[in-house]
Amino acid sequence: MSLHEHEPLAAEMCVLGIAARDAARALRETTADAKNAALLAAAAAIRVHVDDILAANAQDVSLAKMSGLSGALLDRLALDADRVEAMARGVEEVATLPDPVGRELARWTRPNGLEIARLATPIGVIGIIYESRPNVTADAAALCLKSGNAVILRGGSESARSSAAILEALREGLAAAHLPADAVQMVPTTDRAVVGMMLSGLEGTIDLIIPRGGKGLVARVQSEARVPVLAHLEGICHVYVHEQADPEKARAIVLNAKMRRTGICGAAETLLIDRSVLKSLGVQILEDLHAAGCEIRGDKDACAVFAGAIPASEQDWRTEYLDAIISVKAVNGLEDAIRHIETYGSHHTESIVTEDTSAAERFLWALDSAIVMWNASTQFADGGEFGMGAEIGIGTGKLHARGPVGVEQLTTFKYIVCGNGQTRP
């Protein structure tokens, strides 16, 4: 399609952006009660329209099967009555969260009498680009509404009908609470050109882009966006079994961290084991993984003690498998483990298993990852498990939000300065 042929679509997208900007201004002054009423009405509408949502989803799934979509992606796409009910409950749970807007983050008085306060405010208009999962439509809209932001959603083409049906229920909830329906909008086409338009900022109407999907999508967004991006590219998560680890805890944590759900970003991809316990506890852990159907790619030491392991390559330490595969390396203590994670990790989530408090504290403070854990599975890297309600993803950047991105992370702040006639000398 030529640039000229894109002009009508670009104009349509700018209309979406302007409408979202106007809705964001209205939401900035909306009360917490009104936002909660809209969320509860939206949850009720999802339940009322469950048959419409499932019918739309059946069409999406049928077309996806014909196009050869993988089994894992089909599972993410498919909805049933239980999943729709879970979606509605998720929206209700967001309504129960404390309102993040207007929180006083700090307050102080200057010697000249000026009173200064830092207050949480909405970001404005958020563009969310995602793949496959239609439930993201409800999660993203609910989180943005609760935090006072307007949102423009661009879901995957394979879930277009499902997402559109969910959107109608959400907008019904907004209307019931007398809030602007344009606070939640969806791109009305599957044309991939709109992604580039959103990344350009729609003539200054989009304040933040959040991608949620595979590495290809996130890499493109991070490379091409001309507005701020909140995302993580990879989840190369590590579990380090220290020589002072409790064997029972270590076996349970490693097995859960890798095998509970292998396709999520919080799944462990590399296991580090102190050389001093490799032949004892290490072998037991590898046997557990192997019995659960996990392929083990080990360094020479791991291969030497466990016949079921295959040799790991240099690339394995840098790989996010999202599958029942784990790379295993013997390390010479805490410093060696930290060095490996800093060299090969993606700053997502790391866990140490140990009963040695000083070793744990050193691990927790030394690593520059968004989430660091002690005696816990990396699969807890999730906003719901943090008590934050739903999440829109995990941030691994250094600025703004890191870790699970929930309602508080979808706010920024401003300073309120109150004086009594002061002028600056």
Image: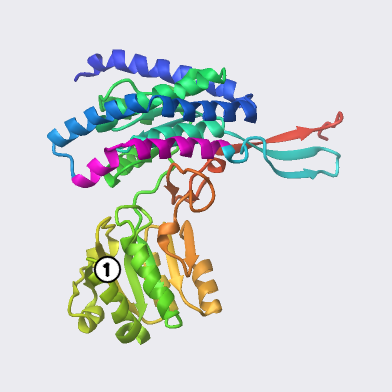
Q: Which residues are magenta?
A: 71-95
Q: Position of residue 231 (x, y in %)?
A: 41, 45
Is residue 107 inside the magenta stretch?
no
For the residue carrying disc 1, how many other residues have a C-alpha within 10 Å: few (<14), some (14-19), or many (20+)?
many
In the displayed structure, 200 sits above or below 361; it is above
Please indicate whether residue 74 sits to the left or right of residue 386 in the image: left
Q: Is residue 22 visible?
A: no
Residue in the picture at 52% in, 36% down: 92
Along the line of sight, the residue nearer the viewer: 3 or 81: 81
Along the line of sight, the residue nearer the viewer: 335 or 99: 99
Residue at numbered disc 1: 327
The kind of secondary structure the magenta stretch mainly shows is helix
Along the line of sight, the residue nearer the viewer: 59 or 319: 59
User: What secondary structure is marked by label 1?
Assistant: strand
Is residue 91 inside the magenta stretch?
yes
Q: Position of residue 278 (x, y in %)?
A: 32, 83
